[in-house]
Image (cartoon, rainbow, N blue to C red):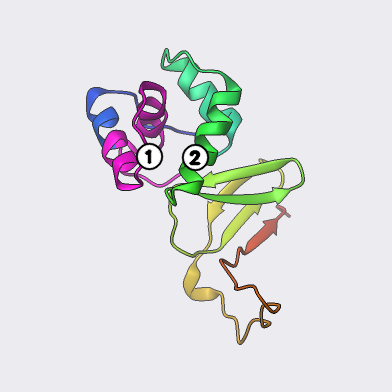
Amino acid sequence: MCFAPLTPASSQAGEKWLLRGKVRPTRQRVSLAGLLVGDGENRHVTAESLFMAAKASGESVSLATVYNTLRAFCDAGLLNEITVDATRSYFDTCVEDHPHFFWEETQELTDAPSSEVEFSRLPEAPKGARIARVDVVIRLRRD
């Protein structure tokens, strides 16, 4: 998984992203945000992959802090969490509705073409609830 290099420019982009979500820009949050969005590219990350990227960039951060930070980013609407199974979640920097491919052999999550997914209707939400989001994960295996 490729991350934006941690540079003053990527940190500045990360700080702007945090401010857009009204997330307090602590040093660690700015560093993690810079890794996630510093180059303007969308990415799908796990907490573990972001933790390793932070360590490789010289950032002193614990895995628990990475998990808590990703949760704060999700709560602020800056990331979407995509759960692929009971033990693995990915965090997507593109928060617009779109489907995903999950490559089972490589454990990689990639965007699928939105234009090729159609729903004729969704069930009504139970009384007192509303549909917040529909996640579509298409699992793939190579032949």
Look at label 1 and name its amino acid.
Answer: Val
Residue indicated by mark 1: 23
Residue 5 image offset from top left, x and y in percent: 34, 26
Q: Would you say the residues marked 1 and 2 are in contact, meaning their CB atoms lie under 8 Å apart?
A: yes
Residue 64 image offset from top left, x and y in percent: 60, 24
How many marks are shown on the rendered structure?
2
Name, please, the residue furthest toward the bottom: 120
Q: Earlier in the sequence, mark 1 or mark 2?
A: 1
Residue indicated by mark 2: 72
Write the start and end of the magenta stretch as one range: 14-43
Which is nearer the eye, 115 or 16? Answer: 16
Compared with residue 39, is residue 11 higher up or lower down, i.e. above or below?
above
| Residue 42 included in the magenta stretch of the image | yes
The residue at 47%/74% (across/down) is 115
Compared with residue 28, is residue 88 higher up or lower down, i.e. above or below?
below
The residue at 70%/57% (across/down) is 139
Compared with residue 113, is residue 6 higher up or lower down, i.e. above or below?
above
Q: Secondary structure at mark 2?
A: helix
The answer to which image quadrant residue 30 occupies is top left
Q: Does the magenta stretch mainly form a helix, a strand or a loop? A: helix
Look at label 2 and name its amino acid.
Answer: Ala
Residue 117 image offset from top left, x and y in percent: 56, 74
CA gap, disc 1 to disc 2?
A: 8 Å
Residue 32 image offset from top left, x and y in percent: 42, 29
43 left or right, relative to 67: left
